[in-house]
Image (tube, helix red, strand yellow):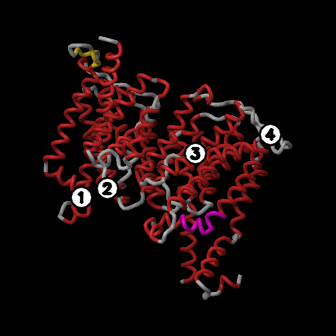
Amino acid sequence: MPQVANIAVSILFDGLAYAMFLFITSVGLSVTMGLMGFVNLAHGAFAMAGGYVVVTLTRTYGVGFVPSLVIAAVVVGAVSVVFERVLYRRLYKSTDLEQVLLTIGLAFMAIATATYLYGPIPKSVPLPEWLQGDVNLGFRYFPSYRAFLIVLGAVLIAVLWYAFERTNIGAKIRAAVDNRRMAESVGINVDRLFTLTFAVGSGLAALGGGLAIQLLGLSPSFAVLYLVLFLIVVAVGGLGSLKGTLLAALVLGIFDTGGKYLLADAGGFFVYAVTVVVLLIKPAGFYGRE
Amino acid sequence: MAASDTIGGTPRQRATDYLLRRHRFRMAEALPWLIAIAVFFIFPTRMTFGSQVLVMVMFALSLDLILGYAGIVTLGHAAFFGVGAYTVGLAAARLDWTEPISGLFAAAIAAGLVGFVTGWFLLRYRGLTLLMLTLATAILLQETGNLRSDISGGYDGLPGLTFKPLLGVFDYDLYGHTNYLYALTVLAIIFFFVRRIVYSPFGQALTGIRENVRRMHAIGSPVHRRLVTVYTIAAAIAGVAGALFTQTNAYVTLTVFDFDNSAKVMVMLILGGTGRLYGAFVGAAVYMVLEDYFSKLSPTFWQFGIGLMLVLAVLFTPRGILGLFERIGDYLAERKRS
């Protein structure tokens, strides 16, 4: 295969895998922010928590990698409900600033707790045989783990799309994102809907955190380091839009990977440049409501 | 004096009286300055740390202008601090421009320009979009610095800078005495400037924008122009703080642009209390002293502590430490009366 095409395929493949990670982790944030307008800077902390649950389960208890991912999503999703009920709900009607402060505070506490329990050094997980090495796709080899990420991402997108567009709950969520007051006045319990989406979103973030261990490495600073990316995906995609989050994840994932392949020095420059350009032209993001 | 006591008068006169009354100095306002001077004599060996506190007070004060008075929530205020810090750092390292006071002016102009240009574009936006755009501004500046690490020194920064003696007379001593008094003088000048702004009609207009943008539009206030103006001023002041940071530490690295730096200054301001000028003093001093003590004990413990303080502050004392004192004062006054 010619060199140029080879690099292009690598960028697309890695970018796609990265985009799937971004989508899985950010989609919950997008929906909860769309529903309540709540600026949740602790979302990255839930992702990090998921990652550490996976580390503990696989390393200490010898649970398999894939079952650990599922358990982490469920556990973190359940724990997040406690936070939502006890802390977040007090601030739904507060200003952006207060929400930012509360959730940054929570993120700091989460980072400190993770440092205390696991130390500052990045952790790794033992992967099953079938996720190591490369997989042959006919014309060339690709890393199995990234292929797994892409397949998993595609499945989750299909499931979420169905839940969002074809189920009763999905219709209620869309109605509440569009016009919360109207949805409430026709008898939709937005409060409970929010708790549900918050739990699912945090669970997905935890899943993303578990998947990130192999992809990006997991250390306590994960909670803040990647939070910025998740927020960017949400802002660029448009609050509460599944389609927008997916498109933003794809654009940012592929741009970031491409930037790092072609111009290693420029580092994160591309992601932020794209963000600024998109938001200046479309302040509410790709599919956001003005 | 008599004018402020009369209830009558034209509305214009009453408004003038109101502004003048607020602008008048109160006895308690001398307190932070007396403490700052006392610290100089009580802790002569901790003056380097003292200068850092003063720099952060100035930085927090600039944030108070836009966050506390105009209600602009930003996650990228470190951008201006960084521009100021690098203006002085690069001028000293690359151009051999080591005169400190002209350096401050250069930093103010550079940071003010960046503030004006970014503010002009960004202040049309609100909410999450604005948060992301301000954050991205700081990171883009950092990445630009990293891209040209041949000039900026990258993440290793510009170490071992030297500056000419202040006013050509006062040289820097090992204990940082000169630096402390220098920083205190600059802070005092900046403070009285900021104080004038917030008690002026312009400052009132900013508070109006914070409280109700729509109403300000409705009464014909040029909202965008006012916001850009205050953003530019705050950026210039943050730039001066950054320049002082570089001068008193004699080094600068790209970490000044970090998200952590933006978050830290916000935490200080919130801790002290927003929209009340002296909140910056209380918040920065309390934060820095606690950090100095606890982070030596255990950085992890300290980080948990800041997080907990933030959560508790939001839930129980939304108006900061000064707000808490005010409430206690009100409560006592109430009891005395009954």
Q: Give the residues in magenta.
A: B196-206
Q: Please indicate whether residue B201 sits to the left or right of residue A273 in the image.
A: right
* Label placed on residue A36: 2
Label 2 lies in what chain? A
Amino acid at pointer 1:
Val
On whether disc 1 and disc 4 are found on a single subunit, the reply is no
Give SS at disc 1: helix
Q: Which amino acid, by three-letter code, is at mark 3?
A: Val
Q: Disc 2 or 1, which lies upstream in sequence?
A: 2
Check disc 4: other Cα within 10 Å, few if <14, some if 14-19, many if 20+. some
Would you name the residue on which mark 1 appears?
A190
Other-residue count near label 1 (Cα within 10 Å), few / some / many at <14 / 14–19 / ≥20: many
Name the secondary structure under disc 3.
helix
Q: CA distance from mark 3 to mark 4?
A: 31 Å
Circle 2 sits in a helix, a strand or a loop, which is it?
A: helix
Q: Which mark is residue B114?
A: 3
Q: Residues within 10 Å of mark 3 (few under 14, many from 20)?
A: many
Identified by mark 2, the residue type is Met
